[in-house]
Amino acid sequence: MEKKLYTVTIFSENTVGLLNQITIIFTRRQLNIETLSVSPSALNGIHKFTITSYASQDIIDKVVKQIDKRVDIIKAYYNTDDELVSQEIALYKVSTQKLLELGSIEALIRNYGIRVLELTETCVVFEKTGTYEETQKLFDELSQTIGVLQFIRSGRVAITKSKVERLSDMLASIEKLQ
Amino acid sequence: MKRIKGSEALMEALIHEGVDTIFGYPGGAIIPVYDSLYDYQDKIRHVLVRHEQAATHAAEGYSRVSGKVGVCLVTSGPGATNTITGIGDAMIDSTPIVVITGQVTSSLLGTDAFQEIDVVGITQPITKWAYQIRRPEDIAWAVARAFYIAQSGRPGPVVLDFAKNAQVAMVDFEPEKCNFIRSYIPASKPDDESVLKAAELINSAKKPFALVGQGVILGNAEKELADFLEKADIPAGYTLLGESAMPTDFRLNKGMLGMHGNIAPNIKTNECDVLIAIGMRFDDRVTGDLNTYAKQAKIVHLDIDASELGKNVSVDAPVLGDVKCSLPAITEKLLPAKHTDWIASFDEHVQREFAEVIDAETNPQNGLLKMGEVVNAVSEVVNHNAVLVTDVGQNQMMAARYFKFKQSRSVVTSGGLGTMGFGLPAAIGAKIACPERTVCFFTGDGGIQMTIQELGTIMQEQTGVKIILMNNNWLGMVRQWQELFFDKCYSQTRMTNPDFVQLANAYGIASRQVSERTELKVAIDDMLKDDKPYLLVVNVEEENMVFPMVPVGNTITDIMTKK
């Protein structure tokens, strides 16, 4: 079956060892995790995981059900890119000397919307947010021209286009079951 | 509220959950709990096993026949790692047990201290929940939650890793009760739409066929199942773990499914027009090749676990929920029906199986004793009323095929994990859970030796387990595969065995050995004349094979009945 990139969103209680419980379910199905981002959600005490992975829909569906089944997982679901607005952040460190040799960095800033975070005699740190393709494009261009000393990219953060994330409504309906 | 030690709080919390029996083994990091247990002997019976793995299997056996949560108590490190097989077994066979492991004191965690092991990390993939109690204040909460999780929804094992400092520290203790966790919905209420869709499919069926799994037993839904099958006149087959959910002689019970199941239910799986799976999970030993499995049928699947719906077989009408609720909801919408011709069409396969397999296996006139006739003979003597416990392999399949049942919760076997060595300790647990019932444990010379040290537990507890050891001096099921599929290359399956009768005698357990057909009935009567433990060694034909057989990966209708 055709593999594509899925974004898995998981809401959980903030308990020790949850990440392990999630990743071993990916491992059992021989899926690589491409990106992973974990942070407190909008609701106090509830954590949100955003995980991307290449898989067939059949497999990602089963993996998400098995994650959702874990006791401390509140809700897990998956989306494809067309259903999401997503963003990643990347940092690039380049040599100040080589950057100056370019003449001007105006084009870089205008074309890529980068921000300069730090500037020293030896190096400059840029930040760029965007999709994977966008941050990669800048990386490729810098690599081919002045070289990149260090590079780091975050995991994806994403929200769905189609619906509001009504986790609080869902929690309220769960609480009613009590 | 009273101020007590953590170890005492554990006792109080267990009693609050209705625990009266623990299977365990003491050791360094759990001594404070055993110290408190000593003062609670009038309320909690502790069964001292001979190996921690046996504690978990005994707890499983106890749970399977009683429906209660089985409890184990072991020490840290090797004590904990020895429970892994039983925890895995309980996970895959949906058996509620709570395993309490000692742990080194909190300040030493992560330092490779003596007998420290990361129990929570190791057991996370094979438990419903694993939690480390590091403070005595967590005991009431964690124990309540553990029991709730273990027995609610699809049951399974829970591990509580109990750090030594929390055992010895003082705490103001008040027992808690847990019946709600917001992130955990154990059993959804079946929704009306899916119930209606399932009922409509079943009503439209001309050739309906039901598959009965352990979910029926776990949900105490035997009566609801019978009502459902009766109303629409639906024949049913059962999985290994679903055995005894229907009495053997029930009109609509058409026998066991799967690799060594009966011919008729396997053939009919691929002839029916609507297949109704009830609390079962389409295991590969039941389905054979999924690409050719029931492709002609619409499939209705009732299960409590959403992740099972559509996991192996794509389903036309999934019904999520406890079968105790979903079965009567569907039954209410069923039109009474008669499927006389369809049901009669099973008969030719029943007759074929009798002629080609069963008659020779259960009524041989000459030659060495066969496993089937031994199982059949014991079942007759106990009037089909006993609890059957099996080990794994040929003994298990023969016992499941030929033992008969009148009441539910009468089969204790390791289905999913297929754990050799499961049987002896599981039989101990089963007998302790229901001392008034006869417990017949069928095993082989391989399986019994994996946990044979538990004869010591039987001796100490005087547990009246009836052990029927069908000895062929081979690892019989592997030998069968080697003969059939590996050019008779009998690699490492021949066993040189001890004198099992002498071994039993050394443990003070009555024992006898039979090899002759004429002695068998007398020996069984002798074994069952009282309620004391007994080991009956029956020397059986070495080449005896389990048939019918659907070779692994074959279509479920591709059935061998002989070599």
Image (tube, coloured by chain):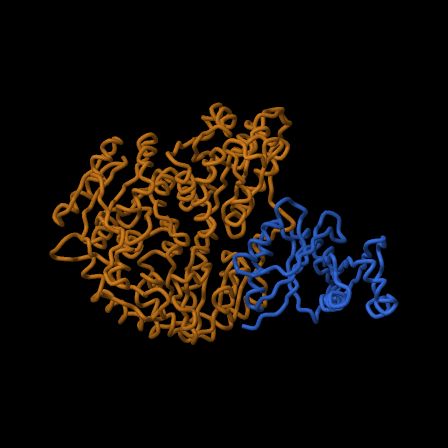
Q: Is residue A121 above or below residue B556?
A: above
- Image location (x, y in percent) of residue B300: 48, 68
| Residue A162 visible in the picture | no
B357 left or right, relative to B119: left
Query: Which quarter shows the C terminus of chain B?
Result: bottom left
State the residue in front, B57 or B274.
Answer: B57
- Image location (x, y in percent) of residue B512: 18, 39
Quarter of the image holding residue B421? top left
| Residue B378 visible in the picture | yes
Quarter of the image holding residue B464? top left
In the image, which lettered chain appears orange? B
Quarter of the image holding residue B235? bottom left
Residue at x 50% of width, y 58% of height: B323
Query: Which quarter shows the N terminus of chain B?
Result: top right
In the image, which lettered chain appears blue? A
State the residue in front, B468 or B380.
Answer: B468
A50 left or right, relative to A2: right
Q: Report the number of discs.
A: 0
- Image location (x, y in percent) of residue B451: 34, 40
- Image location (x, y in percent) of residue B520: 16, 47
